[in-house]
């Protein structure tokens, strides 16, 4: 049997004014790239609440790509600087959770930079392919399976104490 | 039997501070005793789980459950008390969000056992004995609860009617909750009984514009008594934390550490802290930003999730971190045996 190639699931948060258009441009220009990024369009990379990233990873995504306008070129003056600082704090925190910083990436891509954006997508996909799946919910799945030990307690009480006699 | 209500107070993975906080009701505890018979409370009375097992379902009117779920026995008691109670209250930070015991979710059972039973300086354990869930000794079959890798909150284990946050809940807030229960003026089931604003709103300090070039640890500066602590570079969790304590820590020059849990509308305490701090770091240079964060926040999870790790979106650190997994295929963590 042929060995299946692992296809990472990546969530992308793209800015409406630049990188989402770059992605559009990549389509128009028929640039080939990995199909692993599920893109969500936002009005600004500054709209990316850290909750979005944590939720994506904790629900089973293997990586996250945030794309926004180049520093100094934000449609909303300076929100992408906030993104830059949030992203630095987020990476610092994810590292402490044991998640490689190669799973999350912030790229700047203007509407004209379709090829830079697709390159970043391809790099991220290959990076995550080497890291392997994250499978975050499996981290506590084992403890959800201890029910026999819980049920056993009532039986122990019944056999050791007066209950049921 | 009197026509009083029946009150149960139980503890799981917790420190006992919640019981102390109930005692801090002082003379009002007599009013509680007038309204309720305390039918089950292992902390102060000789009551047994097997008494509870014999009661009909929904026999207890109100059960105040403090502590997280760390062992199979605690999970059993949570399920039992859920079944026997009309109203189950997650009482205090441990039951609501995991609290300090939940920080152990950054490690694993095996590592916790190695530290506790082999490595601490005061431990002498030449035989390398660790507690087992089942043992045969002198012909007796002895059992201990199973110790989980991951601390869970009460709400992640059973359905909870109300949450009363705080480490511990302040006595006046407990009293408010008791009155609400007695008068039947409770919010919608599943909600938090508490304020819907932040610790900053209770803080007497003056807030101005925040621009931070360096975060400070509490021992590094003596803060000015009137200015916002975050403005002075101290990592204060006030902007994210639910009000309820009266800003006791900031009042005595100590930053808020978030013990009252996330304010209403905050889904993940740490994520909101990250968003808040990103707005006040005064730099647009990636290298400088990295340096400010690296030097100022050495323990991001301990700082942003000190009380809420078990109830956060991530819930715990990776059982097998990416870095460890890539270096060598690690054998599956040995089962507790």
Image (cartoon, coloured by chain):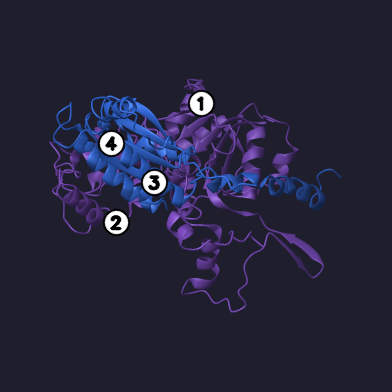
* SS at circle 2: loop
The mark lying in front, picked from 4 and 3, is 4
The mark lying in front, picked from 1 and 4, is 4
Q: Earlier in the sequence, mark 4 or mark 3?
A: 3
Residue A115: numbered disc: 4
C-alpha gap between disc 3 and disc 1: 48 Å
Please give the chain letter of the residue carrying mark 2: B
The residue located at (47%, 48%) in the rendering is B316
| Callout 2 and callout 1 share a chain | yes
Pointer 2: what residue? B298
| Callout 3 and callout 1 share a chain | no
C-alpha gap between disc 2 and disc 4: 38 Å
Does residue A1 appear to the left or right of B122 in the view shown?
right
Image marks 3 and 2: residues in contact by CB distance under 8 Å: no
The residue located at (69%, 46%) in the rendering is A150
Please give the chain letter of the residue carrying mark 1: B
Residue A80 drawn above or below residue B47: above
Using the rendered view, name the quadrant where residue B272 is placed: top left
Residue B278: numbered disc: none
Image spot of residue B284 (x, y percent): 15, 43
Pointer 3: what residue? A103
The mark lying in front, picked from 3 and 2, is 3
The residue lying toward the viewer, choosing from A104 and B227, is A104
Does residue B24 appear to the left or right of B11 in the view shown?
left
The residue lying toward the viewer, choosing from B316 and A3, is A3
* SS at circle 3: helix
Q: Residue furthest bottom?
A: B126
The colour chain B appears in is: purple
Image marks 2 and 1: residues in contact by CB distance under 8 Å: no
Please give the chain letter of the residue carrying mark 4: A
* SS at circle 1: helix
């Amino acid at each position: 049997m042929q060995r299946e190639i692992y296809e990472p699931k990546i969530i992308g948060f793209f800015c409406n004014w630049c990188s989402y258009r770059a992605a559009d441009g990549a389509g128009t220009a028929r640039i080939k790239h990995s199909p692993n990024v599920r893109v969500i369009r936002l009005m600004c990379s500054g709209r990316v609440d850290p909750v979005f990233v944590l939720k994506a990873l904790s629900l089973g995504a293997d990586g996250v790509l945030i794309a926004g306008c180049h520093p100094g070129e934000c449609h909303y003056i300076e929100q992408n600087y906030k993104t830059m600082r949030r992203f630095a704090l987020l990476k610092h925190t994810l590292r402490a959770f044991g998640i490689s910083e190669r799973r999350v990436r912030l790229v700047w891509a203007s509407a004209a930079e379709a090829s830079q954006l697709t390159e970043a997508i391809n790099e991220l996909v290959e990076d995550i392919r080497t890291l392997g799946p994250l499978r975050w919910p499996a981290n506590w799945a084992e403890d959800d399976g201890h029910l026999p030990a819980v049920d056993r307690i009532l039986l122990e009480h019944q056999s050791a104490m007066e209950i049921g006699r | 039997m009197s026509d009083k209500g029946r009150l149960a107070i139980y503890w799981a993975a917790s420190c006992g501070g919640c019981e102390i906080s109930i005692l801090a009701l002082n003379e009002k505890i007599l009013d509680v005793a007038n309204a309720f018979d305390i039918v089950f409370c292992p902390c102060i009375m000789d009551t047994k789980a097997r008494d509870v097992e014999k009661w009909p379902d929904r026999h207890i009117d109100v059960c105040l459950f403090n502590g997280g779920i760390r062992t199979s026995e605690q999970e059993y008691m949570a399920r039992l008390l859920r079944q026997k109670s009309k109203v189950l209250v997650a009482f205090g930070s441990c039951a609501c969000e995991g609290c300090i015991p939940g920080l152990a979710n950054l490690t694993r059972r095996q590592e916790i056992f190695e530290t506790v039973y082999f490595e601490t300086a005061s431990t002498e354990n030449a035989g390398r004995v660790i507690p087992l869930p089942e043992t045969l000794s002198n012909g007796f079959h002895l059992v201990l609860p199973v110790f989980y890798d991951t601390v869970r909150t009460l709400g992640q284990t059973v359905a909870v009617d109300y949450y009363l946050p705080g480490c511990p809940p302040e006595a006046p807030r407990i009293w408010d909750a008791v009155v609400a229960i007695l008068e039947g003026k409770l919010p919608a089931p599943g909600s938090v009984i508490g304020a819907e604003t932040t610790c900053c709103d209770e803080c007497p300090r003056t807030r101005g514009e925040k621009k931070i070039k360096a975060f400070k640890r509490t021992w590094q500066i003596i803060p000015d008594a009137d200015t916002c602590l975050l403005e002075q570079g101290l990592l204060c969790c006030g902007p994210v934390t639910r009000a309820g304590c009266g800003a006791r820590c900031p009042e005595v020059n100590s930053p808020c550490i978030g013990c009252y849990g996330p304010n209403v509308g905050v889904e993940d305490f740490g994520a909101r802290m990250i968003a808040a701090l990103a707005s006040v770091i005064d730099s647009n240079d990636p290298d400088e930003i990295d340096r400010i964060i690296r030097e100022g926040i050495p323990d991001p999870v301990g700082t942003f999730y000190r009380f809420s790790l078990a109830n956060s979106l991530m819930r715990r650190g990776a059982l097998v971190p990416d870095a460890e997994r890539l270096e060598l295929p690690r054998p599956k963590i040995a089962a507790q045996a």
